[in-house]
Amino acid sequence: MTSIEITPEEQSALVKALADALNPLAAAVRSRETGLPEDRMWHGEPAEVALSVLAAWKVVDAEVKRLTAIAAGTAGSYGASYEQLGAAWGITRQGARKKWPDARPAAQPGRLELFGGTAELVQDAESGGWHWTGVGADGALGAADRGYPAKEEAAAHAGAFLKEHAAD
């Protein structure tokens, strides 16, 4: 898993940007709750003021989760695997699949008919790897000995098997 490091300067700039973005939202939440004008958001019981800020952070947290899911889905639509998504987020492949179950488009199985034989291509739901099983024209049975990262690679191996077992 990858850990993203930021410099102290970057962290300071991020904290400032987040506070600048949060303050108007916190003021609006506080104003709605109390009826006070937004410029008086810091007036009142400290716990109540802090709870208004906490409520505003909850809104920000929900929006960050939504935007994160969109980014994961975009990466998945361009071919990023759950392993890659997990590495970017600092979690396992399984954790990424659980966090963003719809980030990867559902893979469609495939069928090859070459040299008088047939092969089926399927993607393993757990690993994401592609496998094939086939029957050559000569009746020989074959299967992938491992998962391949791309459907096209599995198809190439299945095609080579079918060519090797073509009818005479």
Image: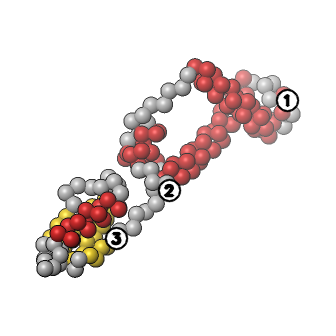
At label 3, which amino acid type do we have?
Gly
Q: Is residue 68 placed above or below 115 in the rendered structure?
A: above
User: Whole-percent x and y of residue 101?
Assistant: 45, 54
Q: Residue at x 23, y 55 (%)?
A: 146
Q: Residues within 10 Å of mark 1 (few under 14, many from 20)?
A: few
Q: Amino acid at mark 1?
A: Asp
The circle drawn on residue 77 is 2
Q: Circle 3: is it few (<14), some (14-19), or many (20+) Cα within 10 Å?
A: few
Please give the residue where the numbered disc 1 appears in the rendered image.
39
Q: Amino acid at mark 2?
A: Ser
Marks counted in the figure total: 3
* Secondary structure of residue under mark 3: strand
> Residue at label 3?
110
Callout 2 secondary element: helix
70 relative to 38 in the view: left or right: left
The answer, for residue 136, to whether it is visible in the render is yes
Q: Does 141 sit left or right of 2 as displayed?
A: left
Res. 126 in view: no
Pointer 2 or 1: first along the chain = 1
Residue 122, x across and y down, in percent: 31, 65
Closest to the camera, between mark 3 and mark 1, is 3
SS at badge 1: helix
Question: Dot 2, crowdedness within 10 Å: few (<14), some or many (≥20)?
Answer: some
